Image (cartoon, rainbow, N blue to C red):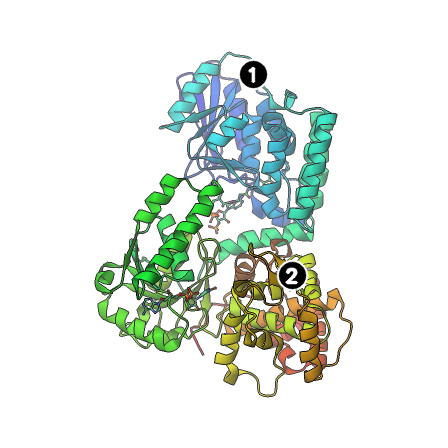
Amino acid sequence: MSDFVRLTKDQDIAVITIDNPPVNALSPGVTEAIVAAVEHMEKDDRVKATVLIGAGKTFIAGADIKEFVKLTSGQRQDDIGILPQLLKIENSPKPVVVAIHGNALGGGLEVAQACHYRVAAADARVGQPEVNLGIIPGAGGTQRLPRLVGIEQAIEMCTTGKPVKTSQAAQFGLIDRAIEGDLLAGAVAFAREIAGKPIPKTRERSDKLGTPEENAAIFAAARENARKKYHNQICQLAAIDAIEAATKLPFEQGCEEERRLFDTCLYSDQSKAQIHVFFAEREVSKIPDIPKELPVIPVNSIAIVGAGTMGGGIAMVCANAGVPVLLKDTDPAALDRGIGAMRRNYDISVKRGRFTQAYVDERMKLIKTTLGYDDFVNADMVIEAVFETMPLKKQVFAELDRVCKKGAILSSNTSTLNIDEIAAMTSRPEAVIGMHFFSPANVMRLLEIVRGRRTGKEVIATCMQLSKKLGKVGVLVGNCRGFVGNRMFLPYIREAQFLVEEGAAPEAVDKALVDWGMAMGPLAVGDLGGLDVAYRIRKEYKQLETPGARQPFLEDRLVEMGRLGQKTGAGWYKYDAERRASSDPEIPPLVKKWVAESGVPQRQISAEEIVAREIYSLVNEGARILEEGYALRAGDIDTIYVNGYAFPAYRGGPLWYADTVGLKSVYDRVCEFHRQHGALWEPARMLKELATSGGTFANFQRVTAQATD
Ligand code: T1G
Ligand code: NAD
């Protein structure tokens, strides 16, 4: 038998164990090995049925995505060809029962659907997440799934990409039995029960395919919903087309149509971008100068200083990960506010069915509050989230250095302040690191882990690992102003103001970016976070601005007249009680007056120029960050923007997008903006070098993230 499968027997039941670590992906040879094993058992008369199970932590997590990269980059010519193999399993004269634990995703669930029965551990998850890679199921999933769960559920699973738990899958008819306790034993017992009975073949079923009359409205509604929800994207609509083909065509023809739609998606820029994001998100945890096997510091308790917007959210993240939290603030009212905000957030999650009340009660029990530092001595790690002023941060870290035990990690959630300056307040700068969560901390997946000049490698390794435990995407960044995300965001929101100063309506700026794919426009984002936050940062760093460089003035004016955004009911837009935005008739005359006073020439500005100036401001600053060494890889910057700034994954992130456009034309456009708008648009040296040498950001690799300059 091949290395990928092991064959054993439990009396009259054969057991095929798939073993292709780390996630039993259907790498070349795996499907063939499974089929060979099934066919081998067919010839053994003592065998009545076969169980298919995965070794390690999961069943099959899908096709081997690396093979798709080889296909679309031309490294591989031949077809991946999973589908024909699955037909051989389905046509087996002896029943094959699949036993699922961990995940059965994509091709993994398609293998399961081609088997005759499916049993699963209670905590397993099954799904068709292909749309997260910009593709659709390509091994018969769009043809078999609707036959098993019906049209609507198949559409839901294939367009959202969200896996479902065993209990739900059993309700849909996708799983025949949920197994408590020993999965293999339960699967073998099930196989013994069904052996000898007529073998159900999914492809022959049609009872859940509905009628053209019934289905017409379902498909129309699904398409309309997909166009709205997945703006600009092609794969969700392709998945709907393929499922519709299942209701109209015989199985084999339906699979051909699925294949045609699959290839259209796979060779699209959108899928290449999303597959880049998939691997980039996994690459961020690889730090060249920090060995994978470096021992980490156990973090079994966390203390948080400051129970405000961020401190409360971070406490929820820790409690959700099962880590006990000690939360400190200055007075009981502040603690009550913090706890109150957490309860409100949890209530929303319960209402949305994400958590049960019992789960929430358990989590809240993990959060203890305090007004002093007494119990901080027991904390393995501290996360500081007090007001963003250096004097207060220094005072708090001096206190932490005094009270915390040796070996404790001291981290700050600062969004702009110098980690080394904070660390210098302690006798243990090697234990100080930045843990920059994004608001709302209990929702946003991104975590910038800021390496100080003296931060110890085991402290970094510990925080990188902890970020995964906390359900975050932890990206290691250097200690420069605004780190990576916010440093790039400053020119992005500055450019938005300049565009309004030059004649674009605020709505036009935001609409251009939303049409292009951003979840929200830059001005609306300002209103969401509070225009006073960026205002304070502009004032705090005024002395660092390039002398004589143009400075935006509109948001300063808005802030100075108390228009701070959503929190004051008005900013660039006005907001109703539910914080729904609408254009504010007061804004155009205000802007007209301020611009007239400034003398900035007015002109028509196209949506194309708006998008180019916004996105290329991110690219240019991103290139500077890479050349200065504050990020390890272009993929790290893309991961930061996709997970922290709602940059569309189907565009791959700012630097992948620039590579897709072509760095020569990006550079030429930046040079044009430099000529038109001055020093702020000076092209980054790396952008110039890569553009003139035909290089790409994707191929740029740095050895270590720089600590500080
Ligand atoms: N192919 C290749 N490598 C994979 C992989 C896959 N499908 N899934 C994971 N890996 C690698 C990953 O890069 C990492 O590598 C290591 O495994 C651990 O992953 C035909 C067309 C299963 C939930 O989309 O969602 O089937 O960095 O860090 O957090 O119709 O991996 O260690 O070198 O993510 O425990 C559909 C993708 C494919 C699922 C586990 N399947 N995987 O999460 O580990 S398309 C998916 C995941 C398809 C068919 C279609 C997650 C996971 P390295 P990890 P994890
Ligand atoms: P906030 O004003 O909502 O909360 C700060 C809390 O710190 C208040 O409850 C205050 O009472 C408390 N505090 C002040 N001094 C204290 C002390 N000595 N001991 C204990 N508690 C004390 O502020 P926030 O928005 O949560 O920001 C906190 C930190 O997180 C800042 O450094 C900020 O830059 C950073 N940050 C904020 C965001 C955001 O979007 N709000 C995002 C990322 C990072």
| Ligand 2 quadrant assignment | bottom left
Residue drawn at x 70%, y 73% is 589
- Residue 415 falls in image quadrant: bottom left
Q: Residue under circle 1?
A: 199
- Relative placement, left or right, of 364 versus 474 is left
- Answer yes or no: is residue 539 visible: yes
Q: Which residue is mark 2?
A: 657
Above or below, 569 against 589 in this view is above
The one of 570 and 280 positioned closer to us in this rendering: 570
Instruction: Name the N-terminal-most of marks 2 and 1.
Output: 1
Image position, residue 544 (x, y; %): 51, 83
Instruction: Estimate the spatial distance between the alpha carbons at disc 2 and disc 1, rounded to whole Å.
Output: 49 Å
Outermost residue toward the right in this view: 604
Q: Bin the neighbour count of mark 1 within 10 Å (Cα to Cα): few under 14, some 14-19, many 20 and up.
A: some
Circle 2: residue type? Tyr
Q: Position of residue 204 (x, y in %)?
A: 64, 20
Residue at 60% over, 20% down: 201
Please tell me in which quadrant of the rendered image residue 611 appears: bottom right
Q: Is residue 58 above or below residue 147?
A: below
Front: mark 2 or 1:
2
- Of helix, strand and loop, which one carries label 2? helix
| Label 2 CA crowd tier, 10 Å (few <14, some 14–19, many 20+) | many
